[in-house]
Amino acid sequence: MPTNLHTSLRQPPFWALLTALLLVYIVWGTTYFATAIALKSMPAIWMNGARFVLAGVVMLAWGLWHGEKLPTARQWRNAALVGGLMVFGAMNLVVFAQKNGIGSGLMATVITTMPMWLALWTRWGGEKVPYTSWIGLALGVAGAALLSLEGDFSANWLGALAAFAAPLCWSMGSYASRRLDLPSPAMAASSEWLAGGAMGLLLSSWLEPHDSLAKVTSTGWLAWAYLLVFGTLIALNAYLWLLKNTSAAVAGSYSFVNPAVALLVGAGFGHEVLTGWVFAALPLIAAALAMILYGPSLVAALTEKKLGRWSANTSTAKKCYQQNS
């Protein structure tokens, strides 16, 4: 997805902000469970490829209708790189991990490590990263280490490897989208989705049986439709709207909420069992995200509070001295 959007100065209506946040919080938190449902009967690679190709066509039509220009050849190439990392690489790794026994709630928790890796790529790319982000990165690594002890991970090392590789791919794609020449937001999204989805469909035609779609259940098609309409076209565009109309910290707050939603849905509807390490890892990951997203502001607020107390104490001491003199 494009990440080079700027926050506008216009304050959006509260109801619009709340609606967009709830869509991103709840819908994205439930997509992991919907993926698990679809995977029971649907070919995994085709599921993602078709979803993003169709979403890309819809976004392309939407962009053209609003007067946006088609990407140049250079922008298509850049979009293919970003889409290859995020749509083809990361999304198929998520599916592969869930296909190999990683629960939906646990998968959502692992994905929250993405901002930590993005901070690392940013630093290696020569951009300044606040020291609070490095503290967050250390906390996140500790949380990821605890997550690796969770039952699903210890039971299937291939699924665990794919689960931890997914946010790495997504973070590299996110960083690349900031540095490369990409078209306007709608065209950037459509070109990335089309490129990444087309890669998936090409691989699916090679690896997956051609008659596999005939075996998809009605429940599987409903789950796929939910991923397409709500997970991609609605929630992702709500996120893009948040990036344009509020701060990056508020827009990125879904990282705190999605794992809780996914864990509740997975345990309540999917009867997923957690051994307990995830509950030890969650506070560390939440603290890591807080330091990465809000670290400088938190430090500034604490510093101002301490300075305010020091100033008040100094003023009180000065008054007492003057009265006693």
Image (cartoon, rainbow, N blue to C red):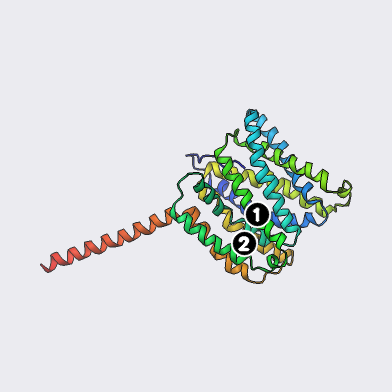
User: Is residue 66 positioned above or below 248 on the image?
Assistant: above
Q: Please rate how many residues cluster around mark 2, counting C-alpha atoms within 10 Å: few if below 14, some from 14 to 19, many from 20.
A: some
Can residue 313 be seen by looking at this rendering?
yes
Residue that carries the numbered disc 1 in the rendered image: 165
Residue that carries the numbered disc 2 in the rendered image: 260
Residue 102: percent from left, percent from top = 71, 62
Q: Name the residue located 54 percent from the left edge and 60 percent from the top edge.
A: 140
Count of numbered badges drawn on the protein: 2
Q: Residue furthest left?
A: 325
Q: Nearer the viewer, residue 37 or 315?
A: 37
Question: Can you tell which mark lies on residue 209?
Answer: none
Mark 1: amino acid: Ala
Q: Which mark is nearer the camera, 2 or 1?
A: 1
Quarter of the figure with residue 4: top right
Q: Nearer the viewer, residue 128 or 103?
A: 128
Q: Name the residue located 49 percent from the left edge and 39 percent from the top edge.
A: 10
Disc 2 from disc 1: Cα separation: 21 Å
> Going from the N terminus, do you reach mark 2 or mark 1 first?
1
Which quarter of the figure is the N terminus placed in? top right
Quarter of the figure with residue 266: bottom right
User: Is residue 107 positioned above or below 211 on the image?
Assistant: below
Can residue 71 be seen by looking at this rendering?
no
Q: Name the residue located 59 percent from the left edge and 62 percent from the top edge.
A: 144
Is 126 left or right of 173, judged from the image as shown? left
Is 172 left or right of 122, judged from the image as shown? right
Residue 74: percent from left, percent from top = 63, 30
